[in-house]
Amino acid sequence: MSAIYTLARHTLRTYLQEKILLVVLVFGGLLMLSSYVLSPLAVGAQIKIVIDIGLACVSIFTVVLIVLLGASSFHLEKERGILRSLLAKPISRVDFILGKYFGTFAVACIVIVLMAALHMMVLMLCGSKITSQMLWAEYVTILEAALVTALLTLFSCFTSPVLGSFFTVGCVVCGHFSDDLLQFAGRFSGGAAHAAVTAFYYVLPNLGLLSLRSEAVHDLAIPPGMLFAVTMYTVVYTSVLLYVSTVIFRAREVS
Amino acid sequence: MLSRASGITGVVLVAALVGATMWVQPFVSRPYLHTNLYLPSGKFVQQASLGYHELASDMVWFQAVQYYGGFAMSQHDLAYFGGLIDITTELDPHFAFPYIFGAVVMAQDLGDLDRGIHLLRRGMQENPSMYELPFEIGFLYYTVAHDDSAAARYFDLASRLPGGKDRAGRFAAFVYSKAGHLQTSIRMWEEIEQDPDEQPYLRDLAKHYVQKLQRQAAQQGGKDPVNKEKTPPHGAGNRNDI
């Protein structure tokens, strides 16, 4: 346990020194502030624009940051020989994977909290009240970050940084299309095609569930039990991804 | 430190960039391109927005407002306005203002009341507890179609929804007033124009329609026939009729 903590802390400290983190934060912050400037142009939707842009910024920039930071770090450690010397110590490969995962996830959480705080400030500047739905929307963005980080960890175990990023972004895109996959499956009246598309629907992460932006913007009630169900779904899905990552990583040679 | 030559090169390049930027400005807006003509359907934009459809809706709404602004400045007609509103509302069905604004413009500027009413009814299906939508249908039935019965029914429905009691009730009273249609329509628009809670853009639009109707009244030389004693129209208040 202490090995995982030490590795996670080391990963977090390394990421916090990266310039890309600052760039993403500044860019995201500027975009949020721009929504305040743009809002008078959005007739009848001044506050809506600020909420929409803010929530979308938090989600998009978090995913971008996870992909940019996470994809290369695994390989850099391998290239610099850090990975080999780490594994020579009493640190298991499972500890390494989990340490990396929690370090990356911690950075994502810090970015989400900072950007969400800025978003709330911009909203208060616009005279809007902060609703519980907005806070829950930020919470599910943290869940989304947990899942995307696990996807990246999995792909980093067996591919190059470029392919790892590509597969992660591909899964994120497909994850937002998953509801359409189910509709698509309905077009086939049984048979192998129906079974294959339905299987894809259940295998891919359903990222549409990890968005409460509509509820936050229009102050709609969140269905009872949804938050708990979504949290459990993310925890279980992430655990499965990390388990597969450790299985793959244990089977691989580290040169 | 920069050398003198690099400094001069920098200044020349910046000046050239300013010149080039000014040079291309006349080609930025080319009316024959009709960019709005190639707008895809709301369903497609929803897929392409990868779950950020509220944000995509805002972007299309920006475009719709700018497009209407171009019409207001007599730059073009409103051929693509309906399409822009449809995409905005398909992307974010709970975004209420485009239904209201779109329906008013369709009924008043495009002369297509049916499409405006259809848009508002679609909005009602998506937002059944929002009194503004049936209120607007009643308003359009009264001011454009001069259909007292339908207007009263929708005002009555609006008055039963949360937040709509005062305003819709007041407008329902207008329907039963003894004044002529034109004068009552002017009063209704004035009410919206003077309502501090109303969207400023809609208040500006209301001001424009008040002036238009006043001109119309002046042309008729006060010949707006005063209605006979109005009785509540048949079926008013029956929610199931709507």
Image (tube, rainbow, N blue to C red):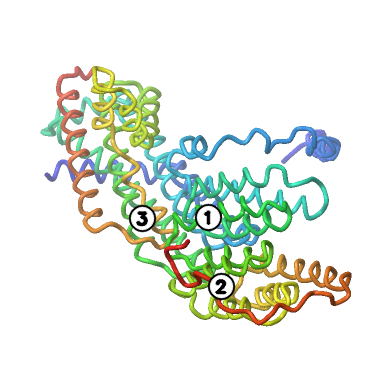
Can you tell which mark lies on residue A134?
none
Closer to the observer: label 1 or label 2? 2
Is A253 situated above or below A35? Answer: above
Q: Which residue is mark 1?
A: A32
Rendered location of residue A140, percent (x, y): 31, 51
Subunit ID for the residue under disc 2: B
Can you tell which mark lies on residue B233?
2
Closer to the observer: label 3 or label 2? 2
Between A163 and B140, the one nearer to me in the picture: B140
Tag 3 near tag 1, CB within 8 Å = no
Tag 3 near tag 2, CB within 8 Å = no
Q: Name the amino acid, label 1.
A: Met
Rendered location of residue A243, percent (x, y): 16, 32
Q: Which residue is mark 3?
A: A137
Q: Name the amino acid, label 2.
A: Pro
Considering only order in the chain, which callout, 1 or 3, is on the residue closer to the N terminus? 1
Per the model, the C-alpha gap separating discs 3 and 2 is 47 Å
Q: Residue at x 64, y 62 (%)?
A: A40
Rendered location of residue A148, percent (x, y): 32, 38
Taking A237 as reference, is B57 left or right?
A: right
